[in-house]
Image (cartoon, rainbow, N blue to C red):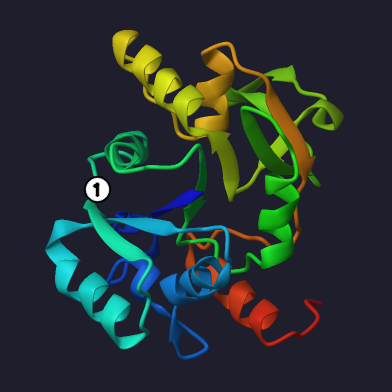
Amino acid sequence: MDCILLAAGIGQRMGKDLPKQFLRLNGKPIIIYSLEVLSKYDSIKNIYITFNENYKNLYTKIISDYNFPKCSLVKGGKTRHESVFLALQHVKSDNVLIHEAARPFINADQITQLVNENESAVVPTIPLPFTVSLGQGYMTNELDRSQLNNIQLPQLFKYKDLKNAHSIAKAENYVATEDGILMFRAGYKVKFVPGYENNIKITTHLDLAIAEIIDRGMEII
């Protein structure tokens, strides 16, 4: 299978000079964590990294310095949705794994869990540990958190089905923030599998601090 690693974002909410994928997590660029796992997974033949053109030299240097021969760069789009669509044009396999560089704590077992499911779309989720509601300014409705899912990556898709879902979205002028929802809207079944609590997405300074604790194997108090 091929893999798309989403890494073209600039991480505005982090407020740093560098995109968050290049920030150091205990001394190592965040993007390296995912690339080390993905590169060592035998079934992954090609890794397409979506990149931000303003920082192309950094992506190239990382691939070279850390010796990731499976990797090649694909110019990212203006949105996450567009970046996936552009990378899909390079995929050559029946299945495609999609991950994002901002989630450094994946492992081979997580990928195998997805591969073992023979579905059009396989998405890991974890339960929501907090109460949620609808409303802006005032509460307008309650939501049953037992029926809600926190969607994670990596995710696995049948290549032809995902490409078709993107074609449908383009025809409907719909932009998705995540490809499981895109597949669902296109009429495909989306299989949920248990996710991992420590598979956090680094978006803010607090996330980075928590990630440093997780990476050191320390207990969060």
Q: Residue at x 63, y 64 (%)?
A: 106
x, y percent for residue 129: 81, 47
Quadrant location, the C terminus? bottom right
Which one is nearer the viewer's eye here, 140 or 221? 221
**Up/down of 164 relative to 155, above or below:** above
Q: Is residue 203 left or right of residue 217?
A: left
In this view, the residue farthest toward the right is: 146
Q: Is residue 62 left or right of residue 155?
A: left
**Up/down of 58 relative to 164, above or below:** below
Q: Is residue 203 left or right of residue 20?
A: right
**Up/down of 48 relative to 118, above or below:** below
- Residue 119 is drawn in which quadrant? top right
Whether residue 208 is visible here, answered yes or no, is yes
Q: Residues within 10 Å of mark 1 (few under 14, many from 20)?
A: many
What amino acid is found at the position of numbered circle 1 in the picture?
Gly
x, y percent for residue 74: 24, 52
Q: Residue at x 36, y 41 (%)?
A: 80
x, y percent for residue 57: 15, 74
Q: Disc count in the image?
A: 1
Q: Residue at x 78, y 77 (%)?
A: 220
Residue pointed to by mark 1 = 76
SS class, disc 1: loop
